[in-house]
């Protein structure tokens, strides 16, 4: 075994560049007295109360107790957060910032590895140590596309104990899950952790009203992770992990939200006799819907501790392949059967150094990202119905939007320092410089019936370069060990690019300047955590997504202003009760923006000044209450209820009646029994108790004269069994 250890050490030392990874310590939650959580939001371990950022952290215990197993579940535990999924793309919006069908506006990291595709944020969440949600631009330490904030998923590290668990659950909609974990400490320097997860929903959430039609939003996944942690030399640690996911089924979908306009029906009279369903969680789609998805991520984190200095290398290689069929008209007439194909490969490398002294904390580093992406959008109109356009196309036409290659390379250097010149006062300064180069190769074509293919976009190569400098300045003052306040100025940046389905069509970067102040307190003998924050954003060149014709375009809105306030509280008055709550007031409006609504072209160019940003409710809040009985020979029971509220908000910038999601509340409840020795656990649960239907995401197509939506999860109830060993 000693020879193996020496061989591994020599192999690592021989690397010209440490293996892929990005910086995030997978430390355990530090319980310092009343459930205080240790986070690594600033790439060093700190109490969450000492971080001068609006941040929420959910430990593995809280995730299990609340039954949160997807990214969408986080939005009902974190202030100012909206999360929805449409056609497999998970969109996270924080304080009205981040919504986009292109690159994510909220940066997502798994064990420090940046995830460049929006769908990746919902695919790797098994066996988590915690989730950290950072609100506001994180342009200094996180950089790329973190102008809305950052969500960090930290997986569980191997422990020094032989242990494991087996979990099984079953809920209505024939929803079954089996998950297992084994942790093996081979010796004092090598530990391993393996987790596997199988999930299948046999009955679709979205029912098809067409006899024999295909129900949607169902499918199965099989995923897993293997992680090795090694101490290769004194103070030198290496963590290696590989994660995979295979999924299939009609999971990526949308349904029709309104009947096509009279103009569109006049172009294609077949729509007049079509079957429509606008009831929640129903469809009348007749064309096949299915997605085959393959994802893998390999990561390595090497850490060398040298007293007051810690050197770290974080590297990651992630691949995602999606091959899907969809019914893009959502009715029983085959107007838009489509195939979408995505193939993404990305490699990231971060090297950073952290210095920690009595009066100074410093993190500085270099970052590199290489991302390659291919995309095909193919409307294969085989059933003889012309697509909707003023000219129309004959039966058998084929429209192909082909992005043969989209390469992005990012180089960045950053530094962030906190200085304590006098007792209780901390001064904060940081800056990041980023350079991004993009190269897109595309070719679009139309095959009209049996005639020759016409190149609507001949083989074209587009190149762009974007640079950004994003600073952060601020101060933090400790009034006592339980009360501190902070104020910061920061900037965020999201790169521009080229639209995937248009020829040589470029959009600009978006920029955000943020002013934020906050107060963090521990009260009532440290049983109550009460945090407040207020913020003001100057938001320019917002990237707005629209479907024009059959293709998606990203355009830039001129400017918007966002202001608001948040309150987050957690109270544990005794060993039995636990109460958590948060509330947000958000005023997010366009200052200067004019646009044409493809669903109402007769209105011409509309001035949208004063309209509210998408998915930015004025008021939102969450309240959770849990009661735990005393431990006894019969075990312990925990009863938990969570209530979430959202005021009315809009899903398109035009703020029309059909663009509106009215105010709603959701209720989740659960009852947990833990055996006396905590070897067994039984959890009964019901989510969305009142079966409230609300729109998770919305899109629209001027070529169809209609809006398309995805729905939230309906009421689900079931049982979960867990055995620890």
Image (spheres, helix red, strand yellow):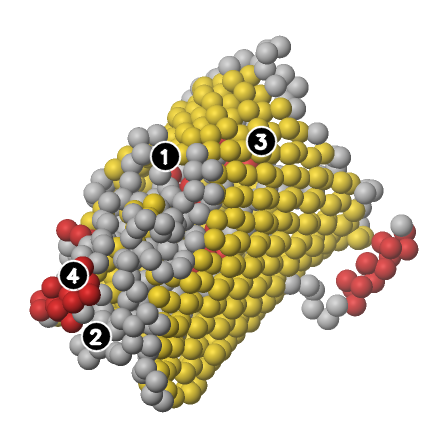
Q: Residue at x 37, y 87 (%)?
A: 453
In front: 474, or 276? 276
At horizontal 51% and vertical 14% (from top left) the residue drawn is 629
Which circle marks residue 715 in the picture? 1
Q: Are marks 3 and 2 in contact (CB under 8 Å)?
A: no
Pointers 4 and 2 in contact (C-beta within 8 Å): no
Residue 27 seen anywhere in this rendered image of the structure: no
Q: Is label 1 in a helix, a strand or a loop?
A: loop
Badge 3: few (under 14), some or many (20 or more) residues near its Cα, within 10 Å?
few
Q: Are marks 1 and 3 in contact (CB under 8 Å)?
A: no
Q: Nearer the viewer, mark 4 or mark 2?
A: 4
- Quick check: 548 above or below 161? below
Q: Quadrant of the C terminus?
A: top right
Residue tagged by mark 4?
272
The residue lying furthest to the top in this view is 633
Residue at image x 43%, y 38%? 173
Residue 691 position in % (x across, y down): 31, 34
Helix, strand or loop at label 2? It is loop
The residue labelled by disc 2 is 389
Marks 1 and 3, the one that precedes in the sequence: 3
Picture disc at residue 316: none
The residue identified by callout 3 is 31
Dot 1 or dot 4, earlier in sequence: 4
Query: Residues under labels 3 and 2: Cα distance?
Result: 62 Å
Q: CA distance from mark 2 to mark 1?
A: 40 Å
The first of marks 3 and 4 along the sequence is 3
Q: Are marks 2 and 1 in contact (CB under 8 Å)?
A: no
Above-or-below relation of 435 to 255: below
């Amino acid at each position: 075994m000693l020879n193996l250890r020496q061989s591994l050490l020599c192999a690592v030392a021989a690397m010209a560049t440490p293996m892929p990874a990005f910086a995030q310590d997978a430390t355990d939650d530090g319980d310092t007295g009343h459930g205080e959580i240790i986070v690594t939001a600033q790439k060093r371990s700190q109490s969450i109360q000492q971080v001068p950022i609006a941040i929420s952290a959910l430990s593995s215990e809280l995730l299990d107790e609340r039954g949160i197993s997807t990214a969408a579940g986080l939005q009902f535990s974190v202030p100012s957060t909206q999360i929805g999924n449409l056609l497999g793309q998970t969109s996270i919006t924080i304080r009205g910032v981040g919504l986009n069908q292109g690159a994510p506006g909220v940066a997502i990291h798994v064990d420090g590895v940046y995830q460049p595709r929006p769908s990746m944020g919902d695919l790797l969440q098994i066996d988590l140590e915690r989730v950290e949600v950072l609100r506001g631009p994180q342009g200094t330490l996180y950089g790329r596309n973190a102008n809305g904030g950052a969500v960090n998923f930290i997986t569980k590290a191997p422990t020094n104990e032989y242990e494991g668990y087996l979990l099984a659950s079953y809920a209505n909609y024939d929803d079954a899950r089996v998950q297992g974990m084994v942790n093996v400490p081979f010796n004092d320097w090598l530990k391993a952790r393996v987790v596997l997860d199988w999930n299948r929903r046999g009955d679709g959430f979205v029912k098809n009203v067409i006899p024999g039609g295909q129900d949607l939003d169902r499918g199965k996944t099989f995923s897993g992770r293997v992680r090795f942690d090694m101490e290769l030399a004194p103070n030198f640690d290496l963590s290696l992990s590989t994660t995979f996911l295979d999924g299939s089924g009609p999971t990526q979908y949308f349904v029709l939200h309104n009947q096509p306009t009279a103009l569109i029906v006049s172009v294609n009279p077949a729509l007049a006799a079509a079957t429509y369903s606008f009831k929640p969680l129903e469809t009348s789609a007749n064309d096949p819907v299915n997605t085959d998805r393959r994802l893998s991520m390999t990561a390595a984190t090497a850490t060398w501790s040298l007293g007051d200095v810690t050197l770290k290398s974080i590297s990651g290689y992630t691949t995602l392949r999606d091959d899907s069929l969809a019914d893009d008209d959502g009715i029983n007439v085959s107007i838009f059967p489509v195939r979408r194909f995505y193939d993404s490969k990305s490699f990231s490398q971060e090297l950073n150094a952290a210095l920690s002294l009595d009066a100074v904390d410093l993190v500085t580093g270099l970052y590199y990202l290489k991302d390659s992406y291919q995309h095909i959008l193919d409307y294969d109109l085989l059933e003889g119905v012309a697509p909707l356009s003023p000219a129309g196309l004959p039966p058998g036409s084929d429209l192909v939007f082909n992005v043969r290659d989209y390469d992005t390379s990012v180089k960045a250097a950053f530094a962030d320092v906190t200085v304590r010149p006098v007792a209780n006062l901390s001064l904060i300064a940081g800056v990041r410089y980023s350079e991004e180069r993009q190269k897109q190769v595309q070719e679009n074509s139309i095959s009209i019936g049996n005639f020759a293919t016409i190149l609507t976009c001949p083989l074209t190569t587009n190149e762009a370069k974007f640079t950004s400098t994003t600073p952060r300045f601020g101060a933090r003052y400790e009034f006592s060990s339980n009360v501190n306040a902070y104020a910061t100025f920061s900037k965020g940046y999201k790169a521009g690019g080229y639209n995937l389905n248009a020829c040589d069509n470029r959009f600009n970067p978006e920029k955000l300047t943020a002013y934020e102040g906050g107060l963090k307190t521990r009260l009532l003998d440290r049983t109550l955590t009460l945090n407040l924050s207020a913020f003001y954003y100057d938001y320019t060149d917002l990237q707005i997504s629209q479907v024009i014709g059959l293709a998606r375009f990203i355009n830039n809105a001129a400017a918007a202003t966002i202001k608001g306030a948040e309150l987050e509280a957690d109270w544990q008055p005794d060993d039995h009760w636990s109460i958590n709550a948060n509330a947000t007031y958000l005023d997010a409006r366009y200052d200067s923006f004019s646009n044409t609504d493809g669903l109402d072209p007769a209105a011409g160019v509309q001035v949208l000044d004063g309209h509210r940003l998408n998915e930015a409710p004025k008021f939102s809040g969450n309240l959770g209450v849990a009661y735990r009985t005393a431990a006894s020979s019969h075990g312990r029971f925990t009863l938990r209820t969570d209530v979430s509220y959202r005021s009315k908000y809009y899903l398109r910038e035009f703020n029309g009646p059909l663009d509106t999601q009215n105010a709603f509340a959701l209720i989740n409840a659960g009852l947990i029994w833990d055996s006396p020795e905590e070897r067994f656990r039984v959890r009964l649960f019901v989510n969305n108790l009142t079966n409230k239907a609300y729109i998770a995401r919305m899109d629209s197509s001027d070529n169809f004269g209609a809006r398309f939506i995805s729905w939230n999860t309906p009421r689900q109830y079931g049982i979960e069994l867990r055995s620890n060993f």
